[in-house]
Amino acid sequence: MKGACLCNGVRFRTHGDTPNFYQCHCSLCRKQGGASSNAATFVLEENFSWEVGQEQVSRFTRESGFTSHFCSVCGSPVPNPLRDTGFYWIPAGLLEPEPGQTVVAHIYTASKADWESLSPRGQHFAEMPDFETMFQLLHQCL
C-alpha cells in the first residue's frame, strides 16, 4: 500500500497486509493533528520503506518522549519508528484507501475532548493497552 503527505513530497510504501486502525484521543494527538483524534496503525519495520522525501522529514520530541515526525514542507504527520518496538507508526490519513480496513480500537478515551462523541465501533480503552493487545486488535480479520 502506498502513502504520501499532503504535498506529495514524502512518499512511502507498506508491504504485506495493512493492519486495521486505531484512534488516539489524547491531548497530544489532538494538538499534533488539530482534530479530535489521531487515526493510525503500525507495521513491522521490514514491511515499511521510504520511496522519496525522507530528507524532508522533521522531528519534534517532548520531554516525555512523545515524538512527532512531519513533512517540513506541508506539515503533515509522517511515519516514524515506534520507539524500540521494531514497528513503524503510520498515520492512517496518508494511506491510499484499501477495502476492509476499520477502526478497531479507541485509546486514551479518558482524556478525550469534552466536545467529542466517541464512535461505538471498536474497543474503547481509557489509556493505552499493552502492545500485544494492540497488535492483536490491529491484525484481526486480516
Image (spheres, rainbow, N blue to C red):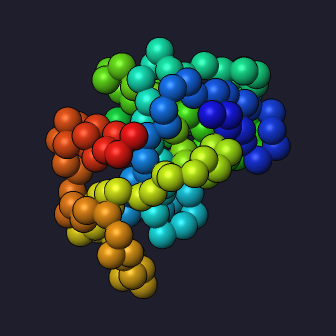
Choose between 18 and 52: the one closer to the eye. 18
Q: Residue at x 20, y 63 (%)?
A: 126
Q: What residue is rendered at 48% in x and 32% in y?
A: 17
Decide if residue 121 is on the left or right side of residue 21: left
Q: Is residue 70 visible?
A: no
Residue 8 image point, x, y percent = 80, 38
Q: Position of residue 25 (x, y in %)?
A: 37, 63
Left or right of residue 22: residue 101? right
The quadrant in which the C terminus is found is top left
Q: Nearer the viewer, residue 93 or 110?
A: 93
Image side of residue 36 versus residue 7, left or right? left
Q: Which residue is found at the position 60% from the left and 19% from the top? A: 49
Measured from the top left, where is residue 7 in percent x and y? 82, 43
The mark total stands at 0
Is residue 41 visible to the viewer in this orientation of the structure? yes
* Position above or below: 23 against 84: below
Q: Nearer the viewer, residue 46 or 110?
A: 46
- The quarter of the displayed image where residue 42 is located: top left
Image quarter where the N terminus lies is top right
Query: Where does the image place residue 2, in percent across and percent down from the top left?
Result: 67, 34
| Residue lying at 19% horizontally and 43% vertically, measured from the top left | 133
In-image side of 7 versus 97 (left or right): right
Looking at the image, is 120 positioned above or below residue 22?
below
Q: Is residue 84 above or below residue 62?
A: above
